[in-house]
Amino acid sequence: MNSYSLTRSNFKDIFDRLSAEYRLFGPKRLAGRGRFSDTDLITCDFLADIDELEFEEKSFMSPKSVVFPADETTFVFNEEEFKEPLMRDQREIIVFLRPCDINGFARLDKIFLENGDRVDPYYQRRRQKIHFFMIECSSSFENCFCVAMQSNHTDNYAVALRFDKESIEIQIRNDHFNRFFESFGTKSAFTPEFVKEDAVKVELPDNDEMPAEIFNHQMWSEYDQRCIACGRCNTSCVTCTCFSTVDIFYPDSRTCGERRRVWDGCHLDGFTEMAGGHSFRKNKGDRMRFKTLHKIYDFRKRFGFDMCVGCGRCDDVCPEYISFSSCINKLGSTLKGEKA
Amino acid sequence: MSADLNRKKVTKNAFRITKRRNHTALRVRVPGGHITAEQIAMIADIARRFGDGNMHITTRQGFEIPNIPFEKMAEVNAALNPLIEELQVANGVSFAASNSGYPAAGMRNISACIGNRVCPFANTDTTAFAQKLEGQLFPHDFHVKIAVTGCPNDCIKAHMQDFGIIAICEPQYDYDACIGCEACEKVCKRKVTGALSMKNGKVIRDARRCIGCGECVLACPTGAWTRNPQKFYRLLIMGRTGKRNPRIAMPFLNWVTEEVVIQVIRNTIPYIDRYILRCLPKEHIGYIVDRTGYDVYRREVLENVKLNPEAKIARTMQWPGYDTLNDANMRSADYWKG
């Protein structure tokens, strides 16, 4: 493993050289595009220039869209045949992201590649092109609880970066990338550090089996009133993978169209709605229960680790100030109360 | 003995004649209704030292300090100086003489809603816009009322002004980021004009129905709807209260920039000067436009204005209101007995 200390201008040169071979993706500040006027939207998107990379603030959206776009065409059809669209840009992709999000990709991998007897080809063909460039977190953000979810740490990166005021420290784990860095900067002994403590403390329930009473417990009913079903917790979550499929017909055609899969979420109205209008979770409290148990209980039963990575975006973005980390803690104390 | 006053001069200096003989009330201008705790303490200090300790919050977001003896006017004006420095001079108002108080009272205090420094719905910083207008328009002797509101909810009642400025936004759509959740379509249908409709899981915006409120942007969970960072405004004109023909202001310009709004209001001053009836003690601008007709007004105030390409101009103008002379509609109690 090599480490280098770079100047800002070194890093700009390296960024440009990387751009010539790779597509670069990461947190991006869109000036004036925030929800409120005169605020910025920090999303995750492809980067054309080093200046577009937002390495200081946490993004509103997660980087999952690089492998799981919000709206993706799975095939186009006419009355005789169907065809999967080609991936037009075959270049490999460098994703700038933080440790929690790298751990988030391990969750996405489970759902798209190992859940059931076949891999998801649309996910896989993007996923295998990805290299992680990890942005070190010097401290946690407002709602982070990565330490509780054990997603504060990872070794799964090609390059780690620390953005200091003047310099940029990097460590290269994937030697393939050495050639971009070795002619710049000076050798160093940099190794990235990881957040050891978050301000938000979360105690995960340690139940192997969730008592059946939790299903109808009144602790969920407060969310009936509080949640407005906007779905921001789902769309901003790095591990939410639900989608709906829709078939659309091209205008002026009776026979041609395409099938798409579009992000959906358990908090949104219409999610998993059945023919005849039957809805499994009409109350918002039921949706909160479904999400909570999926993120910190039943995913673990299947895959051995929790789905939630504690990035805290759901808490960042909720317009109604619903805190998911507080909900986990409420569930924990409810369970303790029941046990006692 | 009563003071020997030049009443017109006094009024122009923002001191008014009050019921109480030999006592005046000072109108303090607070552009945008935005003021620091220190500034309000300065106003309170004037009320304590020269008035009777009372202050009135005016409908236009200024203050009126009553019960000041006329002989204290010079001292009051000197005491006003630091406040004028901060609220007028700092915003670009230039004065011939300092320590002489407000040089004009015709152009009323420019009021504004709280705007996007606080309100999530506001499409712009209305406070800053009001302060900028103060710098561009004050002092002036013509009686003109202006208010800036951050969104079409119009909390500041721009519809009751000579110039009501409504900040609007152009929502821009990222087709690929839209997940078809219908949140925008629902909020637009329920709260606004139903400018959005769904087709094939995506949203179609009817630009002619869109009033630029920004509710779709607020509702969108993925950032598919965002505001065009270029700010736009709707300018309503010639609304009024008053004794003869109260009416609401109507849209004159839509989707115009801040520069256009400011230039049109500035151009209105020479228009007033050309057409005002000087036989009256004062004539409100709306009544002048009633006499010259909208066409003349439009032509004269838009002269030399460089309109942005998005700008729309009202073809004709009619103001909903009523004539207070129409008393035929009012019936005595006998009528209702049948």
Image (spheres, grey):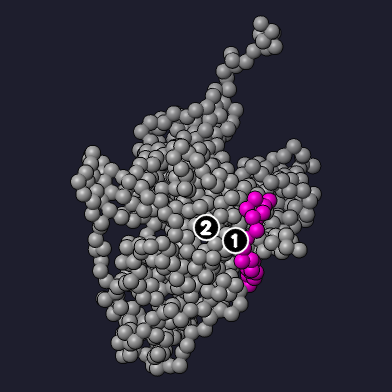
Which x, y percent locates residue B89? 56, 60
The chain holding disc 1 is A
Quadrant location, the C terminus of chain B: top right
Residue at 57%, 43% (x, y): give it.
B155
Q: Is residue A3 above or below residue B229?
A: below
Task: Identify the disc placed on residue B223.
Answer: none
Range shown magenta? A199-218
**Residue type, label 1:** Phe
Query: In the rendered image, which quarter is residue B289 located in?
Result: top left
In the structure shown, which secondary structural element does the residue marked by tag 2 occupy?
Answer: helix
Q: Residue at x 50, y 35 (%)?
A: B249
Instruction: Give the CA distance from mark 2 to mark 1.
Output: 9 Å
Task: Please name the residue that numbered disc 2 is placed on.
Answer: A233
Answer above or below: position of B65 versus A136.
above
Labels 2 and 1 touching (C-beta < 8 A): yes
Q: Position of residue A103 (x, y in %)?
A: 47, 72
The quadrant in which the N terminus of chain B is found is: top right
Q: Residue at x 55, y 74 (%)?
A: A150
Q: Residue at x 49, y 62 (%)?
A: A237
Residue at the spot of label 1: A324
